[in-house]
Amino acid sequence: MSLIPAYPEFAPLSLEMAQEISPHMVKLPDGISEFSFTGLYLFRHRYNYRASISGDLLILSGERDGSRFFITPCCSTGKEIVEKLFSDHDYWKLISPAFLEKNSQWMRDAGYEIQEDRNNFDYLYLRDDLAHLSGKKFHKKKNHVNAFLSSYPSWTIKDLNGETRKDALEVLEAWVLHEEEPQNTDYEAAREVLSLMDHFPMTGQVLYVDGTPIAWTLAETLGDGLISAVHFEKARTEYRGSYQFINYAYARSLPDSIKYINREQDLGDEGMRQAKMTYRPSGFVMKYRVNRP
């Protein structure tokens, strides 16, 4: 029996829904960072995510800043169900290029205006670029890595797993002390993912200096196996170059089958946008939005 109700009924996300929702996500070609059960579940409270299904169409409903939205990760839909969804939602978000290929004609024929959602574009980097930092365009980043190696010759790195997650948690607690509004960060989601790692198909690393944990990263594979999406990356900034080095080390640890690294969106934050651009993205995972007609 399905745990996901048939549309128009919705149910809050639960861990037990993973087996039903994940198949809708793993084969999606675009590599949108939100399109994994992991990401949806960990941010279920922030967005009040609920799920429904209509045929082979998974529908997610959420709320943010007093507005309701819906998401249709896969695969095809039509005017009738979209009109029903818009009757009690304000906008349709995270529309992928692959989804548009199958649905854009009827959407435009029906008068829907499809808009690029630049603040939510995921930043896409070539794994090889981040693993080598070669050439003039990565000169400053490589300097940070070299400074780390020079300053902390006793560094070590371990896989993030059941034995080392307590060390990642120690880094997280040190990191959050510097956040003025931790409730507006991914702190709670990061704590939860460390406690529930065994439930999610994620890999990561913990970085140490003289045995002290100073940084960690956690990611999962998307885009039909071609993209590694980094969902969490935390570091103690009193260790010079800690962020740059964990980024570099994790890219080097990935197999050659991973072509791209997705480092998620900037959410319109200019400081974050500038920081992400300094790593010279090879492109973006584009996302689109439709407002209520």
Image: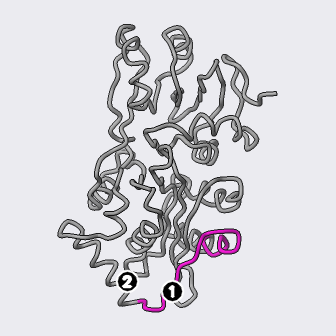
- Residue 206: image location, x then y, percent: 55, 74
The residue sitting at 34% across, 18% down in the picture is 113
Instruction: Say whether residue 107 is left or right of residue 234.
Output: left
The image quadrant of residue 168 is bottom right
Q: Is residue 28 left or right of residue 167?
A: left
Residue 271 position, x and y percent, is 31, 57
User: Which image quadrant for residue 288?
Assistant: top left
Residue 160 in magenta stretch = yes
- When the figure is inspected, residue 135 is found, relative to residue 103, above or below; the finding is below
Q: What is the x, y in percent for residue 81?
A: 55, 12
Q: Residue at x 66, y 57 (%)?
A: 192
Q: In this picture, which residue range is highlighted in magenta?
A: 152-168
In which image quadrant can residue 29 be found? top left
Classify 10 Å Cα crowding around label 2: few (below 14), some (14-19), many (20 and above): some
Vertical arrangement, residue 249 with respect to residue 38, above or below = below
- In this rendering, is residue 267 above or below 293? below
Q: In this rendering, would 66 be left or right of 8?
A: left
User: Identity of the amino acid at label 2?
Assistant: Phe
Quadrant assignment for the N terminus = top right
Mark 1 vs mark 2, CA separation in Å: 10 Å
Residue at the image position 59 percent from the left and 72 percent from the top:
159
Q: Which mark is residue 254?
A: none
Residue 243, how many percent across, how many down? 41, 71
Few, some or many C-alpha atoms within 10 Å of disc 1 (few <14, some 14-19, many ≥20)?
some
Residue marked by disc 1: 209
Label located before the other in sequence (1 or 2): 2
Mark 2: which secondary structure? Answer: helix
Query: Is 133 in front, or is 178?
Result: 133
| Amino acid type of the residue tagged 1 in the rendering | Val
Q: Which residue is mark 2?
A: 148
